[in-house]
Image: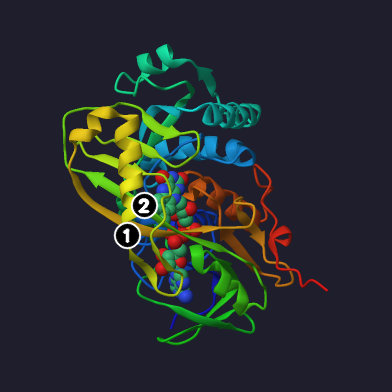
Amino acid sequence: MTGRFDCAVIGAGVMGCATALFLARGGMRVVLLDRGPICRQASGVNAGTLTMQMTRAALIPYALRAWEMWMRAPEWLDGGDVLARARHGLSVAFTEQEAALLEERARARRAAGAPIELVGPARAREIEPGLNPSVRLAGHCPIDGFASAYLTGRAFRAALLNAGVDLREGRAVEGIDPGFVLRTAAGPIPAARIVLAGGVWLEPMAAWLGVRLPIKTLVNQVVVTERQPRVMSTVLGVASGLLSLKQYENGTVLIGGGWQGIGDRENGPIAVRPDSFLGNVRLAAYTIPALREARVARGWLGLEAQTADALPAVGPVPGAGGAWMIGGVHSGYTSGPYLGRLLAQAMLGQAPEMELFPIDRLLHKETA
Ligand SMILES: Cc1cc2nc3c(=O)[nH]c(=O)nc-3n(C[C@H](O)[C@H](O)[C@H](O)COP(=O)(O)OP(=O)(O)OC[C@H]3O[C@@H](n4cnc5c(N)ncnc54)[C@H](O)[C@@H]3O)c2cc1C
């Protein structure tokens, strides 16, 4: 018998794990439940890019703080490591249209605090000599990098247990009865407050509370090459956002960028689309020509959640006092730890360092 928890966090991705960790460190008795293993959905299969160049301008101040947290992960994860590495980042434009897009996005992100400067082809190829010479313009950000996302769960697990979080993996929550009593196959779990942290499953979770929150499901593809000699040292993207590329220390190159596969929230990721696969690797090999010689080791898919404005849903659930929510942001791996810390601050009654992202703006409104 566990008694009543101060807080039940439902969903052990990066958002739920970070929230649970900082709540427990703030003195709450926390249970963290996931229907599968910790960080095995989006938070364990993503491309691991920790970047300002893919982050929406309004989120840049948060992502900058989150980037710092990732780079110092072993300090606040009790030695847990996601092998975060700081690198220079380049977002490149090959066409006039991409150059215009790049200028506009770089301006907005710079205004929000990201140290992005526009550089011409010569400087871009000085920073990344392997880059295709046909590059016209690049956004250069010295604060970029990557982590190994599949290490996220292992890195969080020890810190969560040290902080006293009751971590229950393989424990699906089936619904919520009045008074925040969680329904599970192993019996009811009562809590004084709850946090919904379900990634793409935030929408059905919100429905448990009678709240209609539309969440878009993206079926993102990632491809990894076999190990090979060094072909690049930066984190590379293209202005359209359809590429993220980096080479790990073991020589493998990870190719992402949100090309879509087949799947949905109900059935999970089902299959890679051949045209997406080819489009993704061709763009990578165009951007870094040495990749034409690379051999693909494998590709996989994961489900990314996105709210209507691609900004986070972080805050109290309207009309459901004691229920909170976190997630739904584009490129949420980068900002996850900081958003979790902010939510925990608010729930602990402290003034959060930065504003949360109210849920009201996202709720489905019936039209007459
Ligand atoms: C392929 C891919 C590549 C990406 N690349 C990047 C990138 O390079 N950089 C970046 O910043 N972001 C990237 N993202 C986005 C990033 O991964 C997500 O924004 C982030 O991981 C979301 O974390 P989360 O905790 O909200 O969701 P998740 O990690 O999906 O966690 C939600 C958890 O809820 C659990 N759950 C659901 N229903 C229940 C239930 N009923 N009971 C109990 N548990 C439940 C699930 O099992 C899951 O573990 C990528 C995403 C994908 C899919």
Q: Which residue is depicted at the point 24% across and 27% down?
A: 231
| Residue type highlighted by circle 1 | Val
* Near-viewer residue (140 or 193): 140
Q: Which residue bears the numbered disc 1?
A: 272
Quarter of the image with the N terminus in it: bottom left
Q: Quadrant of residue 35?
A: bottom left
Q: Is residue 240 left or right of residue 260?
A: right
Cβ–Cβ under 8 Å for marks 2 and 1: yes
Q: Quadrant of residue 179?
A: bottom right
Quarter of the image with the C terminus in it: bottom right
Vertical position of residue 279 compared to residue 343: above or below: above
| Image location (x, y in percent) of residue 81 | 32, 44
| Image location (x, y in percent) of residue 91 | 46, 30
Describe the colour scheme in one phrase: rainbow
| Image location (x, y in percent) of residue 107 | 63, 27
Q: Residue furthest right?
A: 368
Q: Which residue is depicted at the point 47% across and 44% down?
A: 334
- The secondary structure type at the circle numbered 2 is helix
Q: CA distance from mark 2 to mark 1?
A: 7 Å
Q: In this rendering, does residue 163 appear at all?
A: no
Ligand 1, what quadrant?
bottom left
Q: Which residue is depicted at the point 73% across and 58% down?
A: 361
Q: Which residue bears the numbered disc 2?
A: 276
